[in-house]
Amino acid sequence: MRRRLLGALAAVAAMLSGGAVMAAPASASETSDVGTTVTAASTAPSLDTVGQLIVERLQLADTVAQAKWIKGTPVSDPARELVVIDAAVAQATRDGVDPALVRRVMSAQISASKVVQRGLLTYWNHNRSQAPTAAPDLTTVRARLDEIDTALVDALGAVEATAADPDCHHLVDHERDREYPGLDSLHRKAVHTAWSTFCAEP
């Protein structure tokens, strides 16, 4: 099922993107930015742990999408989303982590999960023969999501200074472009969404 999903997701991403995009040659300013990124990355706390948790959370969106397909429930679940965000903010407040950082990052994780879910549901609507036929147990999945969210709050606490650093966007771009084995184009698109609110606005 997983192998079939990977092939399916690649097709969804291609359909959503509407075609290939050619990369433009790097300009002198872009080359300078690369140097800045390397310098920043060498002094700032690593974002690896946050990135790994983001990807692990996104991979569970496949199972959530399967359950919602079978049950016919909508992708958005405002009540559940509020519970998730409030729990993370409460943990942050208790543990001395910036609650504003946690709130905006957790909101982005929910949005990123919806990118995957909607992509899958769109594909299954057009390819009924490849749609799931059995609903997974969402209770187990949500328990694992809660564990990841707890770890994510802890990881965010270790990189609070990076979120407020002037070079934050360079570091986030590096994480967005990181190659994760088995991560298809739909999930990579979701990774970009997941990182979209990490850096503090000036």
Image (tube, rainbow, N blue to C red):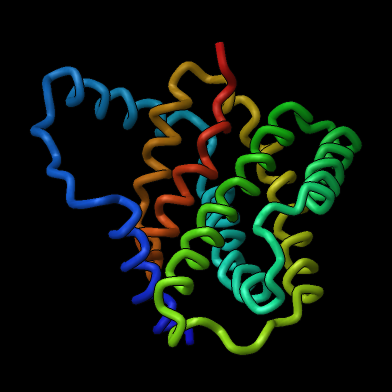
Q: Position of residue 117 (x, y in %)?
A: 56, 61
Give 4 or 148, whichever is nearer the viewer. Answer: 4
Give 69 or 170, whichever is nearer the viewer. Answer: 69
Q: Residue furthest left?
A: 25
User: Which quadrant would residue 35 be assigned to in this image?
Assistant: top left
Relative to 4, is 167 above or below? above
Q: Residue furthest top?
A: 202
Counting every numbered tag in the picture gives 0
Q: Residue at x 31, y 59 (%)?
A: 15
Q: Position of residue 169 (x, y in %)?
A: 43, 27
Q: Residue at x 47, y 49 (%)?
A: 191
- Asked if residue 64 lies left or right of residue 19, the reply is right
- Asked if residue 157 lies left or right of residue 42, the reply is right
Relative to 153, is 130 above or below? below
- Asked if residue 15 lies left or right of residue 72, the reply is left
Q: Position of residue 20 (x, y in %)?
A: 18, 51
Relative to 67, is 121 above or below? above
Give 60 or 173, whichever is nearer the viewer. Answer: 60
Q: Residue at x 65, y 29 (%)?
A: 160
Q: Position of residue 163 (x, y in %)?
A: 58, 27
